[in-house]
Amino acid sequence: MRDTNYMAPVSAPPNQRSTGTGGRLLGRIYEAIQNRLLEGEYPAGTKLSVEAIRAEFGVSKQPVMEALRLLSADGLVEIFPQIGCVVTTYALEEVEDFFRMFAGFESVIAAAAAQRRTDEQLDELYLAARRMDRLISEPDAAVRASQYRIQNRNFHEVIHRMASSRVMTNMSRRMWDLSDFLINTTGAPQPFGSAVAERNEDHARIISALDAGDAETAKAEMEKHILATATIIQQARTAAVS
C-alpha cells in the first residue's frame, strides 16, 4: 500500500541567471514576465512596454531589455527594430509541429522512467496525481486552469526525476515553457480549465504503466497525452472565434 503521508519535495526552477545583485534583479524581472507569458496574461501579438515594465520594477531600462532578450531567445517574444517587443504569435501548424516533437521527446522520458523509477518516486507521483484530482472541484475555471499548469509541471517533473537523465531533463525544461506558452496564447486563454478531469485520466494511465515498469505502454500513453494537447488548443481556438 502506498504511503499517503509521503510529502513530495517542492523544487523551484533553477535561476541560472542570478549571480550578484544585477543578476538577481535581472532574474526577478525575467521570471515575472515569463510567468505572465506562460499564464497567458499577455495574448499573442501584444506589444510589451519597456517603459511600463521599467516603472513597475523601479529599475533602469537596461535590465528590462536584457530580460526581454532572454525571453526572445526562449521563443516567447520577438524584438523588432523601431517597433519594440511583441509577444510571439505562432501559426496553428507550428503549434501542431511542436506538440508532435514534444510528444516524441516526453514519451522517451516516460519509457526511461518506467525502467529506472524508485518506489519512493512512485509514491511522490501518486501524491502529485491526488493533488491534481482535487482541482476538479475548484469552482473558478481560471483558478483551476492556473493551478493545473503548476501542478501539471510538478507531476511531469517527478517523471523526469524517475528517468534520472540530466540531458533529457535539461532539454525538456525549455520545451515545457514553450508548451505552457502555446497552450495559453494560441487559442482561448486557459483552455485546460474545462479539461482537468480528462487530463487526470491520462495521468492515471501513465502512472499505471510506470508502476508496472511497462516502458512501451508508458511511452505510448505519454505520447497520446501530449498529442491531445494540440487538439484541446485547436478546439479552444475554434470556440473563441465562433
Image: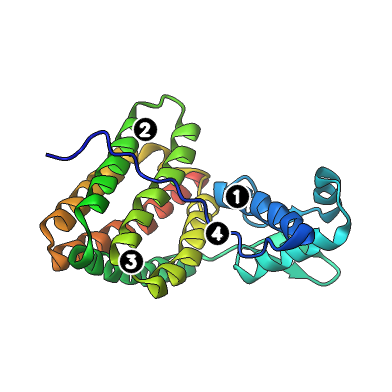
Q: Nearer the viewer, mark 4 or mark 2?
A: 4
Q: Which mark is residue 14?
A: 4
Q: Is disc 2 in contact with disc 1, using a CB cutoff of under 8 Å?
A: no
Q: CA distance from mark 1 to mark 3?
A: 22 Å
Q: Which mark is residue 35?
A: 1
Q: In this view of the protein, which residue sits in the foreground, 148 or 46? A: 148
Q: Earlier in the sequence, mark 1 or mark 4?
A: 4
| Element type where label 4 sits in the image | loop
Q: Which residue is mark 2?
A: 135
Kind of residue indicated by mark 2:
Leu
Q: CA distance from mark 2 to mark 1?
A: 20 Å
Q: Is residue 148 left or right of residue 23?
A: left
Q: Earlier in the sequence, mark 2 or mark 3?
A: 3
Task: Report x, y in % for residue 142.
Answer: 50, 34
Kind of residue indicated by mark 1:
Asn
Q: CA distance from mark 1 to mark 4?
A: 14 Å
Q: Is residue 119 visible?
A: yes
